[in-house]
Image: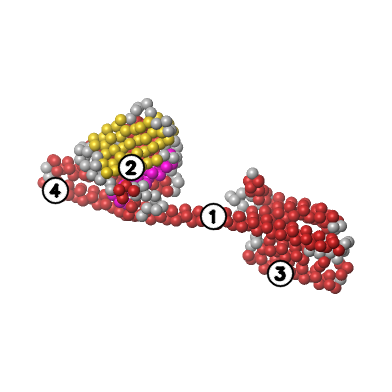
Amino acid sequence: MFVQKWNNLIGTKEGFSLEKRIFHGVCLITLLVLLICFPANFILGLDIFAYVLMVVFVLLLILFYFSRYSGHSKITFSIYVFFMSLVLVAGYIFNCGIDGPIILVFGITFLILAAIMERKQLLFWMLFQLSIVYVMLYLEFNHPDMVLIHYKERSFRFFDTALTLGVLMLTIYLTISYIKVNYQEQQVLSNKKNEELSKANASKNKLFSIISHDLRSPFNALIGLSRMLKENHDELDEVEKKEFVNAIFETSTQTYYLLQNLLEWSLSQTNEIHFSPEQINLKELVNNALAMPLEVAKSKEIQITTDIDASKFILVDKNMMETVVRNIVSNAIKFTGNEGEISITADYESSGITLKIADNGSGMSASTLGSLFANTSTATAKEVIQDQGMGLGLILCKDFVDRHKGKIWAESTKGVGTTFYIFIKS
């Protein structure tokens, strides 16, 4: 609660730079210090200086308002430094001169201001502050009567010095702590941006690797198949021609899936793909996802069977989940031989629905299964581009399932087949 109110007072990160927010914080800390100094100076018999501090409090409040709410922070900072210098001059004159604690306050004030002012202003304000101090010391040395008020009792001097030192230490503690917290937050934000940039560069490199490898391979295959069909058309019988046509169809379909995955993956990496879950009939969703893979399955005489309750609905993003089902079924077709079988079933529980896609294809080794869903931030280009985009498609599936706060995993036996599981919460 306090942190939120404090951040509202000094300004949001979006609306103000770090330096401006620190300046606003210093203004508020100064106002707090002035509130402490009012009664202390009355107790010490320094009534005139106490009234001066009251005026300073009001003027500083006005400065803070103009900087925080009127957007004139640059000019108000300069006015603040100049104004505080005049206050210290008044404090020197009305608070016992060199016998009082104001000389110490000059140094501490500059230390705090130096931490937030621009580097190009630093030398000017340092010389300005030093000039004031040296002039005041010179004038008091030659004209002692310029100091209008002195301590009435010796004990007041010790009390004033002790109080001033305590207030200064508190001011330094609050200011430096606040500055360090803000710079640490800025560092965390900077590190986060650097990490996002690194991930973006890694994604870009993987994208180029995929384009250079995966798109080249199927297009080379299409060109080769079509060239052979063109050059040997008259010599081929109808069965051989059909084999060429089926091969061209399968390759072009897989290339289309790859391009679609590339597009969706690129949008996913740049957060430009929208997540819009809605209640969807599960059987209709699966049937829509199977529209194109079924054509490829027919060319390989692969039988795809589904056993899904037509009354079951699921809360998902329609486009994302169709992409997940289509990718997994397409991979199953790719690694299942002619006349193979693929089954799609669903288990219904109170916690959610588990969709199972099983094939009797070539299966996977344990090492391949373990790195199946390699994250895009850690996967190498070789892992991502393996098997003509299989890695990319599965990474995309995991990303989409994760957005639903679901789970995706696989079980496989080499030479027996593979089963993929997709769990979506109710």
Q: Amino acid at mark 4?
A: Asn
Q: Residue at x 34, y 48 (%)?
A: 370
Few, some or many C-alpha atoms within 10 Å of disc 1 (few <14, some 14-19, many ≥20)? few
Earlier residue among tags 3 and 4? 3
Q: Which residue is mark 1?
A: 188
- Front one among 328 and 247: 328
For mark 4, give the secondary structure: loop
Nearest-to-viewer mark from 4 and 1: 1
Magenta span: helix, strand or loop, mainly?
helix
Earlier residue among tags 4 and 2? 4
Q: Amino acid at mark 2?
A: Ala
- 141 left or right, relative to 421: right
Horizontal and vertical percent position of residue 421 = 35, 39
Q: Which residue is mark 4?
A: 232
**Distance from the alpha carbon under mark 4 to that under mark 1:** 65 Å
Few, some or many C-alpha atoms within 10 Å of disc 3 (few <14, some 14-19, many ≥20)? few
Earlier residue among tags 2 and 1? 1
Q: Give the magenta range.
A: 385-404
Q: In the image, is residue 399 part of the stretch drawn in magenta?
A: yes
Q: Residue at x 66, y 65 (%)?
A: 121
- Front one among 399 and 150: 150
**Distance from the alpha carbon under mark 4 to that under mark 2:** 43 Å
Nearest-to-viewer mark from 3 and 4: 3
**Distance from the alpha carbon under mark 3 to that under mark 4:** 92 Å
Q: Residue at x 40, y 44 (%)?
A: 399
Q: Say which mark, if any, is on residue 127.
A: 3
Horizontal and vertical percent position of residue 321 = 38, 38
**Distance from the alpha carbon under mark 3 to that under mark 2:** 72 Å
Q: Which residue is mark 2?
A: 410
